[in-house]
Amino acid sequence: MKRFFSIILAVLMLASALVGCGDDKKPTQNNDGFLTVYFFDVGQADSSLLLFPDDTVMLIDAGNKADGEEIADFIDDLNIDVIDYFVCTHPHEDHIGGALDIFDEFKVLNVCVPNIDADFLPDTLIYKNLVTAIEMEGSREIKLSGGTAVIEKEHYNVTALSPSKSSVFSDMNDYSLTLLVNCFTNTILFTGDAEAPAELDMLASGINLDADILKVGHHGSGNSSTEDLLKAVTPQVSVISCGEGNTYGHPHDDAVKRLGKIGSRVFRTDTVGTVIAKCHNGGFNIETDSSIELDGNR
Ligand SMILES: [Zn+2]
């Protein structure tokens, strides 16, 4: 009798192993027709994950080097194994530091970077590693200037707003790739670390900057989120990604006051943790989750 049960057990184990063999591809994450945006709490850094209604996955920045593994683990837990678009807004450590963990963990199909003159690109190890990783992965590198469509689908589209082809800035932050995301009735503006000169350029381009949600520029720096930009954007909700007690004094009181003046509701990742926007056909909801804390430096 004992031998009989052993045979049954062996057959069951073999059957389950065979099922496992045919299940290489993880089931796609089901986004239930929403656009879900995670503005991750990565301390004094930036990283946002966008899950579009058709399950297209976009990651905008990957935090500091120490955050990369935690960001990758979180995305992996959502049963995602392909990043369709990895946006590197600009080549600073607090935005591309965790990039290698993303390439290690996922198939990365497209990498979007700002179209910056080669002479102005940095010589840092972190940037060189990114360039090598893109080559090794075989990702399609898309160099974007303002006014270029990145994705155009039935229910959503993503457009690059800056840098413009003709812009010359003295600060790398102003070359940040800024993106406008439209989905259903909702618009979200991601401005990387752009400051006043880049904001002026965006305003001068004449493009409609009106957005429901603003990912506030440069972690809430006083030189970003100028009055003129905020008048054009009029965000109902503003999200600031910054670290608790950071040495830069982000967010700056002036920027927070300007956001308050236009009646925008401000969410700071240093006080509320990860901010989650669920956008649907008729509006959006905001949730916060302090348990999603992906700051590898903490
Ligand atoms: Zn930054």
Image: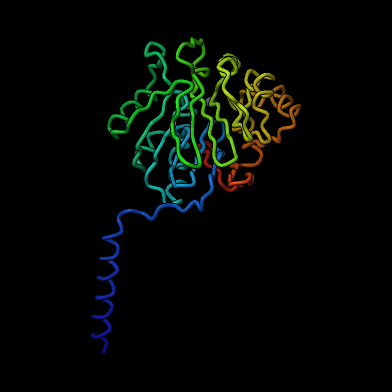
Where is residue 109, by image quadrant?
top left
User: Left or right: where does residue 81 sit relative to residue 232?
Assistant: left
Task: Give the residue at x 68% y 35%.
Answer: 236
Q: Is residue 242 visible?
A: no
Seen as rendered, the residue at the extreme front is 154
Tell me if residue 53 can be seen: yes
Determine the residue positioned at 48% across, 37% down: 67
Looking at the picture, tell me which residue is in the foreground, 135 or 145.
Answer: 145
Q: Quadrant of residue 184?
A: top right
Q: Residue furthest bottom?
A: 1
User: Residue 180 location, x and y as percent?
Assistant: 54, 30
- If the image is split into quadrants, where does the N terminus sit? bottom left
Above or below — where is 65 with respect to 34? Answer: above
119 to 160, vertically: above or below: above
Q: Where does residue 111 sit, x and y in percent of width and height?
A: 38, 31
Instruction: From the top left corner, tell me how far across and down residue 54 is, in percent.
Output: 45, 47
